[in-house]
Amino acid sequence: MTAALQAQDLAKKYGRRWALRDCTLDIPAGRVVGLVGPNGAGKSTLLKLASGQLAPTSGTVTVLGGPPADPAQLSRIGFVAQDTPTYAGLTVADHLRLGARLNPRWDSALARERIDRLGLDPGRKAGRLSGGERAQLALTLGLAKRPELLILDEPVAALDPLARRDFLRGLMEATAEHELSVLLSSHLVSDLERTCDHLIVLTDSRVRLAGEVDELLATHHRLTGPRRDPGRLPADQHVVSARHTDRQSTLIVRTGGPILDPAWSVGRLTMEDLVLAYMEQAAPAPAPVPAARPALAVLR
Ligand SMILES: Nc1ncnc2c1ncn2[C@@H]1O[C@H](COP(=O)(O)OP(=O)(O)OP(=O)(O)O)[C@@H](O)[C@H]1O
């Protein structure tokens, strides 16, 4: 099966600053991929490279087996930009007509059916819609284009929890109904937790973690036990993060094998735990604790 997205040493520089570097990814088709990372991590840059809106500084990216900027590819890729932009002066119906005019694979029935189901008045101007309704209109335009890959850049960031849930539910239904790969960025791990089966964590312009969610959750563990030097763990246990008190260590480790040491109590991670562990790993180390107060030291 053709991959939805493949990147090899992909990098983008703005002036002297790298927005993305060393990005190597292989995402199978048919997945809902969550791209998560803090502000300025490089998420939009990656999504723009994947949708052919930016050219790489170095490295390569292919989407659905070809270069994303290729005109033949563009009709296969849908892009819903940050702030889900629409034309304020055009009505909902105008947007659908425009979509039909601009997109060779436009699915009018799908667009009309979604607008009906959402209860959006076709005669209403987009500028008069609520943020949630506008986001749903933008999603409808993205879906009716009948892309094979739909890319959404923080589409729910401005929405309240109910509107977010409705938007993501609509996206999930559409993914189940049509053969669609989705690449979705968000700050909100809780949204991705409900939506995604593949995860990419991007911080400080680099990919820190990428893979199938089930596999990532099965191979990461929280170990809690008597204080221990993480450097003395078995070689196949890669320490992602470590916290220590005087007596106790709490480690997040990645390993394909079982944890056999009976001194550890082994806990499962949520997607949020996993994302935070990798984000924390990339964050600057906290200021050292003064030597006079070792009992309060929390080492990372
Ligand atoms: N057009 C541009 N010119 C110069 N620098 C840019 C440009 N676009 C982005 N950057 C810089 O590149 C880095 C990555 O930005 P990017 O927008 O990809 O991050 P992001 O993860 O999407 O952030 P956010 O969550 O805030 O939207 C940032 O340091 C940003 O300031």
Image (cartoon, rainbow, N blue to C red):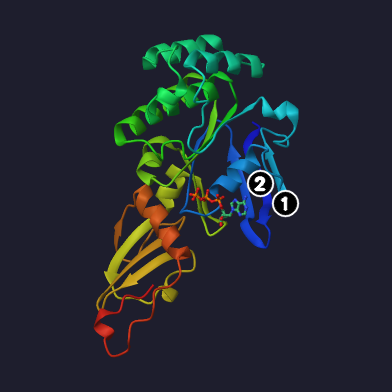
**From this viewpoint, is residue 259 visible?**
yes
Q: Camera-side residue: 47 or 126?
A: 126
Q: Amino acid at mark 1?
A: Gly
Q: Is residue 204 left or right of residue 188?
A: right
Where's the N terminus, which quadrant? Answer: top right
Task: Give the Cα separation between the discs numbered 2 and 1.
Answer: 8 Å
Q: Is residue 40 left or right of residue 25?
A: left
Q: Is residue 165 left or right of residue 102?
A: left
Which residue is tagged 1?
59
Q: Looking at the image, do the residues carrying marks 2 and 1 touch, with CB atoms under 8 Å apart? A: yes
Name the spot of residue 111 as percent of width and height, x first: 50, 14
Where's the C terminus, which quadrant? Answer: bottom left
Res 228 label: none
Element carrying mark 2: strand
Give the answer, above or below, for where 146 lies relative to 68. above
**From this viewpoint, is residue 179 visible?**
no
Which residue is tagged 2?
7
Give the answer, above or below, for where 60 lies relative to 194. below
Which residue reaches farthest front?
89
The residue at label 1 has a CB less than 8 Å from ligand 1: no
